[in-house]
Image: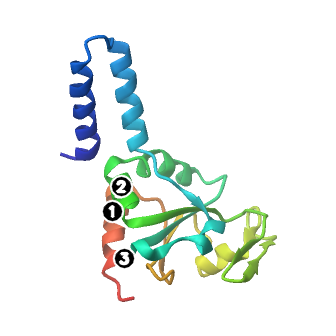
Amino acid sequence: MKYPFVFSILILLMVSCKQESKVDDDTVKSAIVETAKAASELQWLEIDDLDKLDMAGKKGVLVDVYTDWCGYCKIMDKHTFTDPEVVAYLAANYHLIKFNAEQKEPVILDGRKYEWKSGGRKGYSELAREMLEGQMSYPSIVYYNEDKIKIIAVPGYKKPAQLLSDIERVQQLPM
């Protein structure tokens, strides 16, 4: 089954609601929808949070590098990053960060200040250029290990199965 986590929550919710005789069908349906929605949402941090992460849990870091105008970035947000299997895996194994590569606000990371530069379509953050090694392609996923050492940047739109496959390959790379 593709969605065991969400399915289990829904079954538990329906069983517990059936025991409550005063609960109407609309309340049950609303609770099921809210539970499924909550289970499919990832908790994204901002790039400024990277320095503050508690890495004691031995999770890696996944940075979703996007732009506001990027259509495939929006499709990944809507379809890939809401897929229950992707959500469950990422939530359990990664600290998740969204980073707008064109943000104009400076970013301070590891004591270094990264500024916005004009150029490209709408300018870019020096940090994005460094993370992507000058290959300014959106969306891109940048993987860091549990010591916050960059492993690799992987450009391009990914369907859920493709993202999970990429993660599996990244985990097999030498650190």
- Residue 43 spot, x, y in % from top left: 50, 53
Q: Are marks 1 and 2 in contact (CB under 8 Å)?
A: yes
Q: Label 1 belongs to which residue?
A: 164
- Residue 116 spot, x, y in % from top left: 79, 71
Q: Residue furthest right?
A: 118
- The residue positioned 32% from the left and 14% from the top of the image is 23
Q: CA distance from mark 3 to mark 1?
A: 10 Å
- Residue 163 spot, x, y in % from top left: 37, 62
Above or below — where is 43 with respect to 174?
above
Counting labels gives 3
Which tag, 3 or 1, sits closer to the chain's start? 1
Q: Amino acid at mark 2?
A: Val
SS of the residue under disc 2: helix
The image quadrant that residue 59 belongs to is bottom left
Q: Amino acid at mark 1?
A: Leu
Q: Label 3 belongs to which residue?
A: 170
Q: Label 2 belongs to which residue?
A: 86
Which tag, 2 or 3, sits closer to the chain's start? 2
Q: Residue furthest bottom?
A: 174
SS of the residue under disc 3: helix
Are there few (<14), some (14-19), or many (20+) residues within 10 Å of tag 1? some
The colour style of the image is: rainbow
SS of the residue under disc 1: helix
